[in-house]
Image (cartoon, grey):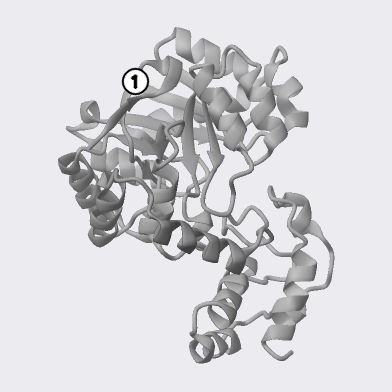
Amino acid sequence: MEYRILGKTGLKISRMGFGGIPIQRIDAEGTKTLVRQLRDAGVNFIDTARAYTVSEEYLGYALEGIRQDFVLATKTMSRTKEAMAADIDKSLRNLRTSYIDLYQIHNIPPEQFPQVMAPGGALEALQEAKAAGKVRHIGVTAHSLDTFRLALEQDWVETIMFPYNIVETQAESLIAQAARKNVGFICMKPLAGGAIEDATSALRFVCANPDVTVVIPGMAEPEELTQNLAAVGNTAPLSDEEKAAFQKVRSQLGTQFCRRCNYCQPCSVGINISGLFLLDGYLRRYGLADWAKTRYASQEKKASDCIGCGACEQRCPYQLPIRKMLRKVAEDFGE
């Protein structure tokens, strides 16, 4: 396993880390097994979040006795000092640890930076927690290029987490700038939220960029870990065949696709928005039309049930035209 220094934090971390979202699909014992497999493979960076339901709690259970073997990161969408302080303490209890290596302000839009940095804002709580030894380093996660730019201007930002993958390369110049400023770059959504099916190609693409400090694919099964380790461990230059495969993925997905972050939920009428987009992908791109149609037919709420309220679009960090996309899903499935 290759190791990198996570920017100005000075933390030595594995080039591939572990993204904690999929823990929500397994139980505590499964998490414990997976975490030990990560340790045995040399993976020492784990990222989770307050918003990932049971993820922090399961990881806390899994890390008992081996906490010292990992660099642990979590994050919250709290914006005030009071809410941030409460979340830090909750994370410490959930993760069963006396300190968190990296605490991140999660999914912050540019217009909220003044609130976060003002007296009584979330940054004040983080800095106090850092002084108290509860938090060792502070970072930011984002989906907006404007946020990335703003974060790079702040001396207190030690790491930035941002989507980067075969079809989302818009941040490449900022990633390079982060490297020059010694700000650690954490690559989230290397598979574009599951839209890219070939994990090996996805990870090969990301790791070919030397400015990416660490990539954090989500994993729930030992087979996924084995496959991802092989991809990240292959440091050979990208072949012409691989580059052609990347271009094929770009042609198939375009730019307006769902990353399944589920920030759009809950739908006001109960539509499983990301689930329907996934089924539409199976229908149109992956040669599983019959299976997709059967699954779609079993959905309690279908794309045609959208009332066009637009609440989902206001919450989408990628500014997707969800209402228009749902109309396309309804059309694809013959509604």
Q: Tag 1: Cα neighbours inside 10 Å, few (<14), some, or many (≥20)?
A: some
> Residue 180, how many percent across, how many down?
52, 19
Q: Quadrant of residue 71?
A: top left
Q: Quadrant of the N terminus?
A: top left
> Residue 330, how many percent across, how many down?
72, 82
Horizontally, residue 152 falls left or right of residue 24, namely: right
Horizontally, residue 139 falls left or right of residue 34, namely: right
Q: Is residue 105 above or below residue 50?
A: above
Horizontally, residue 333 falls left or right of residue 35, namely: right
The single residue placed furthest to the front in the displayed view is 240
Let me know if residue 109 appears in the view: no
> Residue 117, how many percent across, how many down?
69, 17
Q: Amino acid at mark 1?
A: Leu
Q: Quadrant of residue 18?
A: top left
Residue pictured at 57% horizontal, 54% vertical: 167
Residue under numbered circle 1: 11
Horizontally, residue 198 falls left or right of residue 127, namely: left
Identify which residue, 254 or 68, lies in the foreground. 254
Q: Quadrant of residue 46?
A: top left
User: Which secondary structure lies at badge 1?
Assistant: loop
Let me know if residue 304 appears in the view: yes
Q: Is residue 101 above or below residue 276?
A: above
Residue pictured at 38% horizontal, 23% vertical: 101
Residue pictured at 49% horizontal, 59% vertical: 246
